[in-house]
Amino acid sequence: MIKWGNIMKNIIEYFYRIEVEKIKYTNERYYILSDNETYILEECKTKIEIKTLEETQKYSNFHRIITNIQGGIITNYENINYILLKPILKENRNINLYDIETIAYLNIKNNILSTDWDKLWARKIDHFERYIMNKDIIFEFREYYDYFIGLAENAILYYQLAKKENISYGFTYNRVKNNFTLYDLYNPLNITIDPIIKGIAEYIKAEFFIGNAIDIEEIEVLNLNYDESILLISRLLFPTQFFDIYRNGKEENKEKISKIINLAPQYEKYIKTILKAIKKKYKYIPQIKWLTSNQL
């Protein structure tokens, strides 16, 4: 991203016809003050689904997308795509599970995107099996690699038990990062349309691995049907954090990998407790032999 304030000031004034009074680059985005209004210019770092961006603008929850002089959502300058947002927030804070639900249960009439998680996860497993042959960092943790592959394969098998026609779709997220805030929650660039359980599960996982495990009672009151409950368990089983960090393969990530490995036994118990709570509502929810006991 271009970090020269005067250049970006001229670019913003040209493409958006707004007068830039102040501009500041921080947290990999530009904060702009114009006529007592704040705007934020962000680089589009991932593939953009225009239909999804447009869908978010039907709801007042999300930051407003400011179109450029051509009437487009995306502005390209020197082969970099940008989007200008007008945040809706008066204040910012870290999100909670209720915030995720608020977005997930908005009444979306069009299922724009749909992902077969089992096929996606199978491809990821194949990729990692090829990947480990070229990364020295992998071999330090090789004895644990099969364990996480096993979790992923169990996630696929469990996912396949759900009837997909019974799944609700809504606004959700591919990843919920540490210190995810309301600004991130309502940022259209972070949004995808997928089974609503995706963002909920990723949030639960992310919070666990930073030491903020969600209380089981909060999970119990989630408005999930039988098949969505299966998807929740399958998504919790899939070791997203491990694969994401492993894929990076950098030396400084060894500590993060070690932390995930050390937390794995506690995480198993956590999933087991969640499954037990779901069983109170759905007596015949499929069990996982190695994870459950006869008392469940």
Image (cartoon, rainbow, N blue to C red):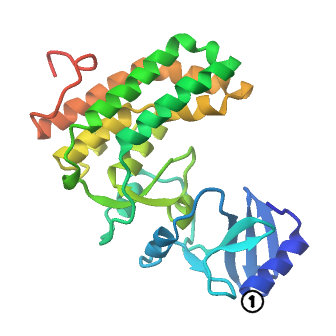
Q: Residue 31 lies in what quarter of the image?
A: bottom right
240, above or below 4, in the image: above
Q: How many marks?
A: 1
Tell me the quarter of the image containing the N terminus. bottom right
Q: Which residue lies most toward the top here?
A: 143
Point 71% across, 84% down: residue? 36
109, above or below 239, in the image: below
Point 77% across, 79% down: residue? 12
Looking at the picture, tell me which residue is in the foreground, 6 or 14: 14
19, above or below 27, in the image: below
Q: Secondary structure at mark 1?
A: loop
Q: Position of residue 148 (x, y in %)?
A: 45, 22
Q: Position of residue 21 (x, y in %)?
A: 82, 82
Q: Which residue lies most toward the left here?
A: 283
Q: Is residue 91 visible?
A: yes
Point 24% across, 31% down: residue? 275
Q: Residue 131 lies in what quarter of the image?
A: top right
Q: Amino acid at mark 1?
A: Arg
Label 1 CA crowd tier, 10 Å (few <14, some 14–19, many 20+): few
Q: Residue 37 lies in what quarter of the image?
A: bottom right
Tell me the quarter of the image containing the C terminus. top left
Q: Position of residue 141 (x, y in %)?
A: 59, 14
Point 75% across, 78% down: residue? 33
Looking at the picture, tell me which residue is in the foreground, 140 or 131: 131
Q: Position of residue 88 (x, y in %)?
A: 54, 74
Which residue is labeled 1 in the image? 17
Q: Is residue 210 visible?
A: no
